[in-house]
Image (tube, rainbow, N blue to C red):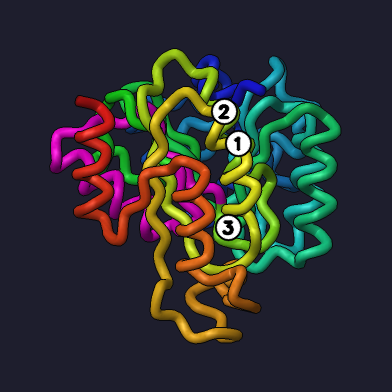
C-alpha cells in the first residue's frame, strides 16, 4: 500500500469550487508552497480565468489528466464532487458537516476507483519543500524525515510548528480528517509510511471517540519505523461531543486512556503531551 502523494508529490492539481473566499485564499497558499495548480472546476464559469487559474464546468473538460484534486465544495455537494474526481490518485476534501452516509459513499467511490481520499473535514497535507494540498500553513513546516499524522486539525498545525521549532523536520504533515468517517484510516497511513524510504519515524496524534486507534494498534507491531503516539481528550466527559463529530466518548473503549494502553501494548511510544512527544521523537531518531 503506497500513498500516491508520498510516492511522488502531485504535479497537476485541480481545485473543485475555487471561487469562494476561503478557497481563493487556499489557492494562493498552495501556489506559494510550490503546488502546480492547473485548473478549477466551477459549474457555470467554464471559460473564465480566476487569478490565472483556468476554469472548467466539468473535470472531463480539463485537457490533461490531474494527479490530485482539492475539493472546496460545500458539504451537500461533496459526494457528487468525489464521484466526479474518482480515479484521480489523491483527493482532498475540506468540507466539515458532510452527511455521514454521503461520506461513506464518497469513501467507497474513491476507494473503488483507486483514489486516496483525505478527509472530509481536513486541512489536507503538506510535504515540506515540495507542495501543499489544502490549508496547512507551509511556514509551520520544514523538510525532514518524521511523518506527522493527526485526527485533529488544530493539533496538526500545533505539532508541525512545535516540531519545526524543536529542529525536527517533517517528511509529511497529514490531517486525516475530524469526522467519524474518513476516506482512509490511520492504520492505512501507517502501512503506507512503513514502505516510505524517506520516513524515519512517525508521530501519530489521535483523540477520543471511535475505534480507529485499535486498527492502528494491529499494524504497529509490523511497522519497521518507530511510532510515537499522543492522544488528546484525557479529561473529556463521556457522551459529550468535544470539538467535532468524531470526538465523542461513547464508552470506556473510546477513551484516551484505553486507546493509549492499546497503542503502548502494540509497541508505540506513548506521550502525554506535545513536549513529551518531541522528547520521544528525538530519542527515536538518535
Q: Which residues are magenta?
A: 149-176
Q: Is residue 21 visible?
A: no
Query: Quarter of the image holding residue 95?
Result: bottom right
Q: Report the residue marked by disc 1.
A: 219
Residue positioned 29% across, 54% down in the render? 158
Q: Secondary structure at mark 2?
A: helix
Query: Quarter of the image holding residue 49?
Result: top right
**Quadrant placement of the C terminus:** top left
Sequence order check, earlier mark of 1 and 3: 3
Residue 169: image tag: none
Q: Is residue 120 above or below residue 4?
A: below
Q: Secondary structure at mark 1?
A: helix
Q: Nearer the viewer, mark 2 or mark 3?
A: 2
Classed neighbour count for the residue bearing mark 1: other residues with Cα under 10 Å, few (<14), some (14–19), many (≥20): some
Residue 168 lies within the magenta run: yes
Q: Is residue 165 above or below residue 197?
A: below
Spatial CA distance of label 1 from label 3 is 25 Å
Q: Report the residue marked by disc 3.
A: 121
Residue 24 location, x and y as percent? 46, 48
Q: Is residue 150 visible?
A: yes
Spatial CA distance of label 2 from label 3 is 29 Å
Q: Are marks 2 and 1 in contact (CB under 8 Å)?
A: yes
Residue positioned 71% across, 24% down in the render? 62
Residue 222: image tag: 2
Residue 89 location, x and y as percent? 68, 25
Sequence order check, earlier mark of 2 and 3: 3
Spatial CA distance of label 2 from label 1 is 6 Å
Q: Secondary structure at mark 3?
A: loop
Q: Nearer the viewer, residue 143 or 271?
A: 271
Amino acid at each position: 500500500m503506497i500513498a500516491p502523494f508520498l510516492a511522488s508529490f502531485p504535479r497537476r492539481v485541480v481545485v473543485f469550487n475555487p471561487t469562494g473566499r476561503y478557497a481563493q485564499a487556499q489557492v494562493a497558499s498552495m501556489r506559494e508552497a510550490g503546488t502546480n495548480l492547473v485548473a478549477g472546476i466551477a459549474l457555470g464559469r467554464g471559460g473564465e480565468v480566476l487569478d490565472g487559474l483556468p476554469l472548467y464546468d466539468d473535470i472531463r473538460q480539463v485537457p490533461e489528466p490531474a494527479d490530485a484534486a482539492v475539493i472546496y465544495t460545500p458539504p451537500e455537494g461533496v459526494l457528487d464532487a468525489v464521484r466526479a474526481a474518482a480515479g484521480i490518485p489523491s483527493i482532498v476534501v475540506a468540507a466539515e458537516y458532510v452527511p455521514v452516509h454521503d461520506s461513506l459513499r464518497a469513501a467507497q467511490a474513491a476507494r473503488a476507483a483507486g483514489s486516496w481520499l483525505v478527509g472530509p473535514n481536513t486541512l489536507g497535507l503538506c510535504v515540506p519543500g515540495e507542495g501543499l494540498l489544502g490549508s496547512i500553513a507551509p511556514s509551520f513546516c520544514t523538510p525532514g524525515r518524521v511523518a506527522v499524522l493527526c485526527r485533529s486539525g488544530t493539533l496538526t498545525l500545533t505539532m508541525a510548528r512545535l516540531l519545526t521549532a524543536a529542529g525536527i523536520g517533517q517528511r509529511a504533515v497529514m490531517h486525516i480528517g475530524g469526522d467519524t468517517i474518513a476516506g482512509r484510516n490511520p492504520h492505512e497511513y501507517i502501512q503506507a509510511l512503513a514502505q516510505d524510504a524517506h520516513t524515519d519515524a512517525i508521530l501519530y496524534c489521535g483523540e477520543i471517540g471511535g475505534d480507529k486507534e485499535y486498527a492502528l494498534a494491529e499494524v504497529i507491531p509490523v511497522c519497521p519505523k518507530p511510532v510515537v503516539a499522543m492522544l488528546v481528550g484525557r479529561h473529556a466527559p463521556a457522551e459529550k461531543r468535544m470539538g467535532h463529530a468524531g470526538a465523542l466518548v461513547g464508552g470506556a473503549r473510546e477513551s484516551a486512556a484505553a486507546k493509549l494502553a492499546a497503542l503502548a501494548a502494540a509497541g508505540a511510544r506513548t506521550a502525554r503531551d506535545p513536549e513529551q512527544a518531541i522528547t520521544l521523537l528525538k530519542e527515536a531518531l538518535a
